[in-house]
Amino acid sequence: AQSVAQPEDQVNVAEGNPLTVKCTYSVSGNPYLFWYVQYPNRGLQFLLKYITGDNLVKGSYGFEAEFNKSQTSFHLKKPSALVSDSALYFCATEDPYNQGGKLIFGQGTELSVKP
Amino acid sequence: ETGVTQTPRHLVMGMTNKKSLKCEQHLGHNAMYWYKQSAKKPLELMFVYSLEERVENNSVPSRFSPECPNSSHLFLHLHTLQPEDSALYLCASSQTDGTGDYEQYFGPGTRLTVT
């Protein structure tokens, strides 16, 4: 069965420092991987996705993610964190054979960026 | 704004009430979804509609009844709910082509409290 795991419930970073939010996956076949962000009292917003091609994927708001097949990871990164990046981040995988689409989410990581 | 709207944003209902949640997408997508987001739990997929037909029902109790009258609208009818059903209910839509290469767009959610 397809799954993703986010090993950290919370990540704390100082503003201006680089940030990493971790995600590992377990999928059969080629993985389809996504990152979403959820700000307080809002729905999820799509950040970026990896389907195929370059291992480094660039997305919205200066975020990027690196697909690492040998480590089965898809960590989200940003070179310089902003206080406004504080939110809940979800890694997800897609079952490409499921009619109508099906996203399987990790449990989420709360990112806190302090001034 | 993501192009997916949900009403109401907040709902308080007693266990004997009947209410409905509404979702509308303005993106021309062909698939719509209901998710449940509870505190400290991963997002749970409840229902998937593709081309207005239900393609997945993840063992959701019958007190939740979805309806998809057309590709732009999705409802979740609620009756005789339990306090543990209190959660954020998220609607999403996507344009699926069977490849898995698509992202879902989420509405802001309905915060449901069952008393």
Image (cartoon, helix red, strand yellow):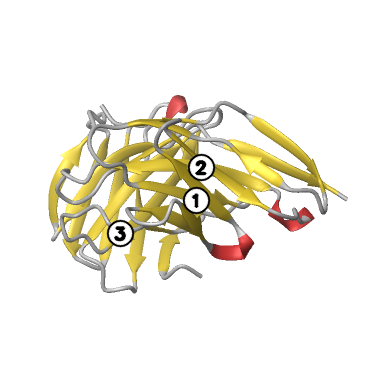
Residue type at the position of mark 2: Phe
Q: As rendered, which of A112 and B66 lies closer to the eye?
A: A112
Residue A90: image tag: 2
Q: Residue at x 46, y 26 (%)?
A: B83
- Above or below residue A19? Residue A84 is below
Badge 2 element: strand
Q: Determine the CA span between mark 1 and mark 3.
A: 13 Å
Residue B102: image tag: 3
Q: Are marks 1 and 2 in contact (CB under 8 Å)?
A: yes
Badge 3 element: loop
Q: As rendered, which of A100 and A73 lies closer to the eye?
A: A73
Q: Determine the CA span between mark 1 and mark 2.
A: 5 Å
Residue type at the position of mark 1: Tyr
Q: Residue at x 25, y 64 (%)?
A: B95
Residue A36: image tag: 1
Have a look at marks 1 and 2 and say if they share a chain.
yes
Q: Residue at x 42, y 65 (%)?
A: B5
Q: As rendered, which of A56 and B48 lies closer to the eye?
A: A56
Whichever of callouts 1 and 2 sits on the residue coming sooner in the sequence is 1
- To which chain does the residue with label 2 belong? A
How many numbered tags mark residues here? 3
Q: Badge 1, how many Cα within 10 Å: few under 14, some, many 20+?
A: many
- To which chain does the residue with label 3 belong? B
- To which chain does the residue with label 1 belong? A
Have a look at marks 1 and 3 and say if they share a chain.
no
Residue type at the position of mark 3: Tyr
